[in-house]
Amino acid sequence: MRNERQNFRPSSLVPRRSRGFTLLEVMVAVAILGMVLVTLLGVKNRSTQDVMLAERITTATLLAKREMTEMLQNKASRPAESEAEDTFPEEEFRDYTWKKTISPLAIGTGSGAITITEIKVAVRWQEGNRQEQVELVSYE
C-alpha cells in the first residue's frame, strides 16, 4: 500500500486539457478583450462629442429665444425692415454670433393681399471645421 501512495500523482487524475490555458487561448482572449475595449472607448468618445454638441445647441437655442423675445417686446421701436449681425457681449458666449432679420412678407395678391412681418433670429457657432446654426422665425 505504501508503494501505491508513492506512485499516486494528483495531476495524473486530472485530464491534461483541464490543467490550464494554452498560450494560444490566452492570446486569443487578450485580442478579443482588446477589440472590445477599443470599441467601447470609441463609443464613449462619440457619446462625449454628442453631449457637447447637444449642450451647444441648447445654449444657441436659449440665446436665440432671448434675442427673439427682445425683438418681439420692442415692437414700437423696431424698424419695418432691417438686418443686423453681431456677437454676444457676455464672455461665456463669445463663440456664438447672432443675425437678426426683419422683413415684410406679402401674402396673397390683388386687393386681398396682406403684409405681415417675418422676424428671424439665427445663432451660429463653429463646431470643428463646420459652422452650426439654430434659427428661430416668428410672424406678426
Image (cartoon, rainbow, N blue to C red):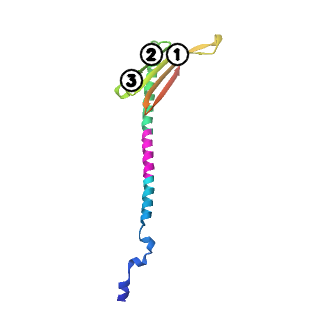
The percent coordinates of residue 22 (x first, y second) are: 42, 66
- Report the span colored magenta: 36-49
Q: Is residue 41 above or below residue 55?
A: below
- Dot 2 or dot 1: first in sequence order is 2
The percent coordinates of residue 6 (x first, y second) are: 35, 84
Helix, strand or loop under label 1: strand
Is residue 137 magenta-colored? no
- Residue extending furthest toward the top: 111
Q: Is residue 5 above or below residue 67?
A: below
Residue positioned 51% across, 23% down in the render: 137
Q: Identify the residue under disc 1.
A: 103
Give residue 63's quadrant in the image.
top left
- Residue extending furthest toward the front: 24
113 displayed left or right of 140:
right
Is residue 37 magenta-colored? yes
Helix, strand or loop under label 2: loop
Q: Identify the residue under disc 2.
A: 74
The percent coordinates of residue 45 (x first, y second) are: 42, 43
Crowd tier of the residue under label 2, counting other residues whose Cα lies within 10 Å: few below 14, some 14–19, many 20 or above:
few
Q: Identify the residue under disc 3.
A: 88
